[in-house]
Amino acid sequence: MAHIVIMPKQGLQMTEGTIIKWYYAEGDTVKAGTPLFSMETDKLTIDIDADESGTLLKIVRKEGEIVPITEPIAVIGEKGEDISAIAGGNAAPAPAKAEEPAAAEAAPAALPEGVTPVIMPKQGLQMTEGTIIKWYHKEGETAEEGKPLFSMETDKLTIDIDAPASGTVLKILAGEGSIVPITETIAYIGKAGTVIPEGGAKAAPASEEKAPAETVSSPAFTRKPGQRLFISPRAKMKTKDAGVDPALIPGSGPDGMVIERDVLSYLTSRPKASPVASVIAAQNGVDLNAVKGTGVNGKIMKEDVLNALKPAEAAPAKAEAAPAAPAAPAVSEDETVIPIRGMRKAIFNNMMNSLHGMAQANHRMKVDMTECKRLREALKAAGQKVSFNDILILAVTKALLKHPCVNASTDGTNIYEKHYTNIGLAVAVENGLMVPNIKHTEKMTLSEIAAATAEQVKKTRDGKLTMEDYTGGTFTVTNLGMFDVDEFTPVINAPEAAILGVGKIGDTPVALDGQVVIRPIMTLSLTYDHRIINGAPAAEFLQDLKKLLEQPYLML
């Protein structure tokens, strides 16, 4: 009997996975317990073993596709086995649903020949949606492949996206200010005069989408208000994993019990909705089938579910206004309301997750910067432009190589000590903060670090950073000295294990050889994850960093 392979859930917060590679082609023989495919989540890349032996009869979702958890991705069975019932939807409801992703893939074929859909691209492993900032071409204008088509904002950066093909912009589905989930179609490019069906590629199979409703082999049990819910253990696990309220699912088991087949049928037949919308609906008992979506191709967004919870007469007006909501803060005489989105949303979530997910401790140490100032002045006189941040990064690099326990990360099972140094430098930008990385500083001289730092800071302020520029860091330096801050406690930039806060260099009276003298003193503040770094090694790292800064010529 054919067995359906689904996208597994690899972590409590996982909602979708990307298929990286199929290790077998259709028609090949697979063995249970051996790798079937490789997948990528926002946390890791992992091989998934086949849970049944047999022939790989059909691959439903191809390499590179992003698939929500529990959705069917392949079918395994006996060689030559007829799976037309699964494909045609004439058998049990669960297998019938397995072919829906393939139908969804076939939908773009309904587009006129030569038309290229433009999708919201994924710019980072954790990206789930993007905001369209500006379209560089209007409908009817000509776009050129490889040239900027629109500007978008993620939780990390603002970036121009090039047109995937040359031609006329036939239709724009998502206007400026719209927040669009990744992989959703936002526009079409093709030959001038080509007519795009209402709803784009999904308009044609509208009548077919209702067919699965007729495949239920046993009548669904309609539960009365307040009636006790019966649900099987496997069905309960499936609803918990998918974040679905089981009370919304009609049961076909004995006495109306909700069984696994009912959950799978519900998950594959329910309307498309964003993850946030699904969670809100489940928490408030909202049936998504009764909610009209205002997102791209009718997808149900958060605002749609919130409107469904309000009086009916207010919902339509809100739904129409939803795309324009992120355009600007709401200002009244008493206050300004600023939506938490984009970069601010990322900071909002990352800082709280960092503090809640780590045992953050802090050490502080004062450093005499007399020799660093002399070194900088000497280099300046020799025509080399070097900042204190550049000297700090070199010193931090040397100290990290000596204390790899500080240059580390953890996945909760293992600690990974890095023997290379990718130093992040916190850079303030409008409405937020970015941390571009200077890669492999252990291989750089002071002048090379200065050049690389200047380049990354410029790219940050010009909004030109790529994903490579702000990922892969092993340690971060954040300096508030230019704002006249004496000392502060920085929050760790996860998944790194430590961060160095740098205060201003200020003339300070200190006792030296029995006399009070004025010296340029700077305070270093090391925040570290006490789960994987002990207090003594953290202090030793600061001590060695202090020695290098007070005797900088030892680094050259």
Image (spheres, rainbow, N blue to C red):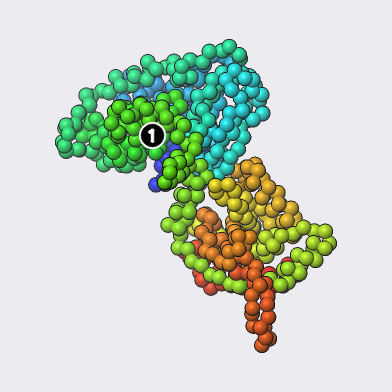
Residue 107 vertical placement versus 413 (above, below): above
Left or right side of 500 for 104: left
Q: Quadrant of residue 67?
A: top left
Q: Residue at (55%, 49%) from the top-left corner?
A: 432
Residue at (66, 53) in percent of width and height: 438
- Considering only vertical position in the picture, is 167 above or below 520? above
In this figure, which residue is indicated by the disc labeled 1? 303
Q: Position of residue 533 (x, y in %)?
A: 51, 66
Would residue 454 be seen by someone viewing this image from the given angle?
yes
Quarter of the image with the C terminus in it: bottom right
Q: Residues within 10 Å of mark 1 (few under 14, many from 20)?
A: many
Q: Would you identify the image quadrant in which residue 500 lies?
A: bottom right
Give, as a three-letter code, the residue at label 1: Glu
Question: Which residue is drawn at the image coordinates 64% and 78% (left, top)?
Answer: 509
Which x, y percent locates residue 195? 53, 13
Left or right of residue 408: residue 15:
left
Is 534 left or right of 382, judged from the image as shown? left
